[in-house]
Each structure stands twice: as structure tokens, then as C-alpha cells.
Amino acid sequence: MTTITAAELAPRIDLAVTAVEGVREVYSARPVVARAFEHVTDADGSLTAVDETAGARAITVCIGVSRDDDAAAVAAAVAAAARGAGDDETPSSVRVRVSRLIVPAS
């Protein structure tokens, strides 16, 4: 089986995460310097951070959920979606950072 690179995997994870029910926003988990470089060079960058070391991956995703959603359940679904985005068998740890979105009452 062909190994997927971090650069190929990150956009796949972005798409998978946005499809998860309960995800209201997806934020960049990547370092500011990388995002700034992409902005200056007009490169398309993904929001997911994927780091590969010693045959394993560390994936970080930042999401926003509403105050009415079960944040733990949404985070678990996001982690499953992130793991499922890769077609290879590379071991992956997934960190999901959750922000609670609060909307003032109307």
C-alpha cells in the first residue's frame, strides 16, 4: 500500500472534518509562520496540522461547536474522520482542539 504524505493527507482531513455533524467552524492548527508564508506566496494551505516522525503521524485539528452540541461526541467523530481520511496503515494519533461557540441570545 502506498504511503500518503502529510501534504496530501491534510486537505483530505480538512474535507472529512467539515463533513462531521456538529462541526460549525474549522480553524487552522498550523503554525502562524507557515500560514503567513502561504499567504505571502498565494499558496493554498490546509487547516489541519500533520506531523510525521519515525513512521507515525501526529494530527491536530481545531474545531468550533455550538453550545447545544455534545463537544465530546463531536470531537470523537472528528478524530474518527481524521483517522479514516488516510488510505494507508500509518499509525496516527489525533488531537482535536474544541472551541465552544457562544451566540448572544436574540
Image (cartoon, rainbow, N blue to C red):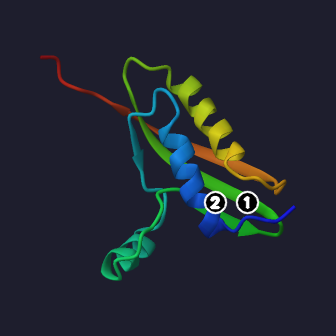
- Residue drawn 40% across the image and 76% down it: 43
Residue 73 locus on image (x, y percent): 58, 24
Residue at 46% from the left image edge and 67% from the top image edge = 31
Q: Secondary structure at mark 2?
A: helix
Amino acid type indicated by mark 2 = Leu
Q: Residue furthest left?
A: 106
User: Left of 24 or right of it: where is 55?
Assistant: right
Q: Vertically, is 7 above or below 73? A: below
Residue extending farthest to the front is: 1
Q: Badge 1: few (under 14), some or many (20 or more) residues near its Cα, within 10 Å?
A: some
Position of the N terminus, as image quadrant, is: bottom right
Which amino acid does the dot numbered 1 rest on? Arg
Label 2 belongs to which residue?
9
Residue 76 image position (x, y, % from top left): 63, 31
Residue farthest toward the right in the current orientation of the protein:
1
Residue 103 point in image, percent of width and height: 23, 26
- Callouts 2 and 1 close, C-beta under 8 Å: yes
- Tell me the number on the disc at residue 57: 1
Q: Residue at x 50, y 36 (%)?
A: 19
